[in-house]
Image: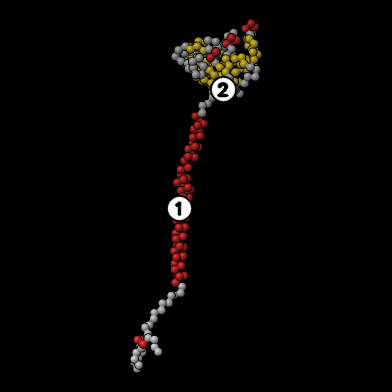
Amino acid sequence: MNDNPQNQAPYGYPQPQPYPQTVIVQKKGGGCFKAMLIGAAVLVGLVVLGMLVNGGGSDSGASGSGPDATSVAAPEQETSKEEAPQEEAEKPKVAGIGDVVKDGKFSFKITKVEKGLSKVGQGYTASKAQGQYVLVHVTVKNIGDEAQMFSDSEQKLIDTKDREYDADSGAAIWLEDSNGFLKNINPGNTVKGFVLFDVPKNFKLKAIKLHDSMFSGGVTVSLAG
């Protein structure tokens, strides 16, 4: 017995055909193709990112070692090299024996130095040193426009420790041609004499500081050597 008599045609008539059924068949390999596309996109992104990173590093390296950096550093080195000789040239030269120096109204020239004298003078004018006498022979010229008094008491002997020693005017006053005690010198005139110092026996001579008066700045002459 037919359960669905409505679907049957009367006997002798052609039987109706069933409706065709649509079958959806999924193609194989679709997921792999999509994965390949995603992988290619990621690979391209990584390549682009790598190019950007390498490009930034090249720029930073060029800024540190390029020609611009060299052109800035080179002038500084050249300037320091050029300034060194100039500083040496500006260093003042220390006057020595035989050099003419000036202070105030006087010019001075040390011509000779005698050391290690135990006494000076003769007879009743002789004077014995406490340590040793040092005689500094000097030529003094008045380069001013009025008379000026030269006094040995304004001259200072200097040792290697930069200590200053006063002249022994009491002993020098009795010596012939000392010309060191209150000698008045007119403009243009020159006087030759010496300044006497009584210093220790272990005294190490360095220089003498000469003054035209007690108010002048003074000028130093090296006596070392």
The image position of residue 91, as x and y in percent, is: 51, 28
Q: Residue furthest top?
A: 124
Q: Which residue is mark 1?
A: 56
Q: Residue at x 57, y 21 (%)?
A: 162
Mark 1 or mark 2: whose residue is earlier in sequence: 1
Mark 2 residue element: strand
Residue 27 appears in the figure: yes
Residue closest to the eye, 219 or 72:
72
What's under tag 1, amino acid-wise? Answer: Gly
Q: Residue at x 50, y 31 (%)?
A: 87
Mark 1 residue element: helix
Q: Residue at x 64, y 15 (%)?
A: 131
Q: Which residue is mark 2?
A: 222
Badge number at residue 190: none
Determine the image quadrant of residue 52.
bottom left
Q: Residue at x 44, y 60 (%)?
A: 45
Residue 176 appears in the figure: no
Label 1 crowd (10 A; few <14 / some 14-19 / many >=20): few
The image position of residue 46, as x and y in percent, is: 46, 60
Determine the image quadrant of residue 41.
bottom left
The image position of residue 128, as x and y in percent, is: 64, 11
| Residue 31, placed above or below residue 130 | below
Residue closest to the eye, 12 or 6:
6
Residue closest to the eye, 136 or 132:
132
